[in-house]
Image (tube, coloured by chain):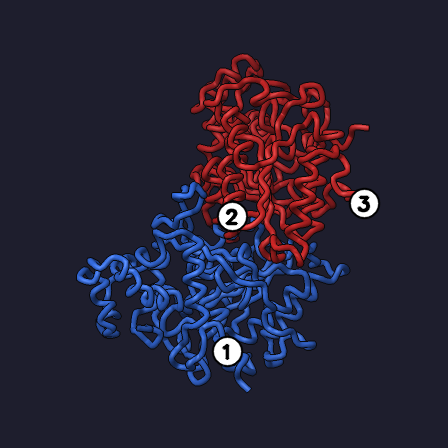
Chain colours: A blue, B red
Amino acid sequence: MPYSRSSGISRRLVLGALAAMPTLPGLLAASAPAAAQSATPLASWNDRSAKQGILDFVRATTDPSSTDFVPPEERVATLDQDGTLWIEHPIYTQVVYCLDRVPVVVKEKPVLAKVEPFKTVLTGDFEKIAKLSLHDVEVILAATLTGMDVDQFYAEAKAWIESAKDHRWNRLYTELTYQPMQEVLTYFRANGYKTYIVTGGGQDFVRVYSDRVYGIPREQVIGTAGGVKYGYGKDGKPFLTKEPKLLLNDNFAGKPEGIHLEIGRRPHAAFGNSTGDQQMLEYAKGGDGLRLSMLVLHDDAKREYAYGPAQGLPDTKVGTFTQGLYDEAKKGGWHVISMKDDWKRIFAFET
Amino acid sequence: MPYSRSSGISRRLVLGALAAMPTLPGLLAASAPAAAQSATPLASWNDRSAKQGILDFVRATTDPSSTDFVPPEERVATLDQDGTLWIEHPIYTQVVYCLDRVPVVVKEKPVLAKVEPFKTVLTGDFEKIAKLSLHDVEVILAATLTGMDVDQFYAEAKAWIESAKDHRWNRLYTELTYQPMQEVLTYFRANGYKTYIVTGGGQDFVRVYSDRVYGIPREQVIGTAGGVKYGYGKDGKPFLTKEPKLLLNDNFAGKPEGIHLEIGRRPHAAFGNSTGDQQMLEYAKGGDGLRLSMLVLHDDAKREYAYGPAQGLPDTKVGTFTQGLYDEAKKGGWHVISMKDDWKRIFAFET
């Protein structure tokens, strides 16, 4: 019962629910190469100001003769995931995971089949599921993301992410990362930057595949995180259980706060695509010396999706690229990346 | 007014206060080499079972033909700091910092000079200071470690740690790291292990000097951590303020929980010296395959200090090496490192 097609659950609803929820750990992520590196950096980028901005920034901060030189140990770049490194429409991938897990949870606790919101999810009726309240979504996230051994979560999420497919492209979600952004990761790392994912999504969920998909090790993923509880199994061996207790809401001001908790340095470069990334981009840009803040604008309805200021969305919409954010970017010297104009191709599988 | 001599504040009191308190960030730590690497690994160790245990573990987990081989991305070693990597007696270095900061805090808020516990600290009377309650110590920690911009904290703590000296040796605290443990860090890293400090002390405090002193970058320091709050200065630039709000009590079960939060992997090797490290060592040892858990036993009153089971301390004493911990180590196959017998020299400055 995959909910990967547009279920209609709004991004706002889901962002709020994720923010209000803890998540859990991931057990795997074999260390594989990320996107293949091209001899020419940023090969999938058109020669426009966004590309030039990245090249200029990296050169200026890594050339020892530059007044903007940054010592290697201080080179930190932080990147949002959903909508910045891979697709986030029509529904966050992690929420698809949670909906897909509902039948498993109900099988373990059959009484839930008659209880809302599980009952509605089990109908598979997208119209009804889309109308679930924020509280209902929180209940689903808590039921599917907490209560188990962290190793068990890692294993289950790994099995899912290795097989679940998006319905528009009929491809694994992990194939729907943006090739130009993979090239940004590779280019930054080739120049001594440590690359971090700073996501409003679940820290433990993203850690399951970050190394394999982005070349980013588990410990360089910061995300919305719940507490874990130390205990002992029947065999006396210690393990950690995911708890429904929020430790870090990694959205909005929570992004710079989470960066401080898990890195302890102000990033020199930051990438995002929504109001949830606003404070992280301000924080990066507000440091001394040369800084780079960039926003991905989803303006390509044909090759991906179009949403944001170009589509006239209201400023109050949470978790998206509002006109207010666009104005702040222009005023603050941030770069706005037009997917339509700046990217030659969006996905690696495009010919 | 340095309190570096034995002020008499008990370790138990201080551990409790640190645990109940948030701490703050650190701004510096230039990337310098840690202890110089000898061609012979573990040169300051005597040829006894502890040294052999380390050599055997590293060989078995890094030899591709070994059944205990661990892929490079999974090689994680976690080490406590106080009493494991450097001296912790007669008083935690970070608490000396806080006491030394009291006059500065009082200068900024003169009214505090007449208020306890500041009044007592200002007398410089060690007997009286030693009798401060846990609550009093918490008040001092909150006053000296929170309320300021994280960058300001980093700068102040950096200036202090670069000049403050221990009174027994009349040396910088940073010279009082254990040379044999510096060699362990170097040896593990040379074999592809990521080394992490996992301390009950303040995460932000240790991050100020971890790179310079141990070769451990800021982001690989996990410690007791408080929240920070995002805000804007008068110039409109964003900054983070240290808040008196506990996020992570990195002692006891908090150690494996903090490891999960900031790394997301069960360590293959762990080093500690007290009951505050017990769960971390259990957690490491409880994983699949070959694991290494080691306890430093302070049994050398002449070259350093002697405390722990050999000294007949009661089991109930928190934050020290109790007889119960010693028994668990022996039963669980952990190694106990005798400072007296296993270490040829304790400090690098010894000839």
Between tags 2 and 1, which lies in front? 2
Q: Where is residue B111 in the image (x, y as percent from the top left)?
A: 47, 23
Callout 2 amino acid: Gly
Q: Is residue A294 above or below residue B22?
A: below
* Residue depicted at x 68% and y 21%: B167
Residue A252 appears in view: no
User: In the depicted view, which residue is nearer to us: B81 or B287?
Assistant: B287
What chain is tagged by disc 1? A
Residues indicated by labels 3 and 2 sit on the same polypeptide chain: yes
Q: In the drawing, what numbered circle is on residue A339?
A: 1
Between tags 1 and 3, which lies in front? 3
Q: Mark 3 points at which residue?
A: B39
* Residue depicted at x 56% and y 28%: B95
N-term-proximal mark, 3 vs 2:
3
Contact? badges 1 and 3 (CB < 8 Å) = no
Q: Name the quadrant containing residue A231.
A: top left
Question: In what quadrant of the picture does the N terminus of chain B appear?
Answer: top right
Q: Position of residue A155 (x, y in %)?
A: 44, 60
Residues indicated by labels 2 and 1 sit on the same polypeptide chain: no
| Crowd tier of the residue under label 1, counting other residues whose Cα lies within 10 Å: few below 14, some 14–19, many 20 or above | many
Q: What element carries label 2?
A: loop
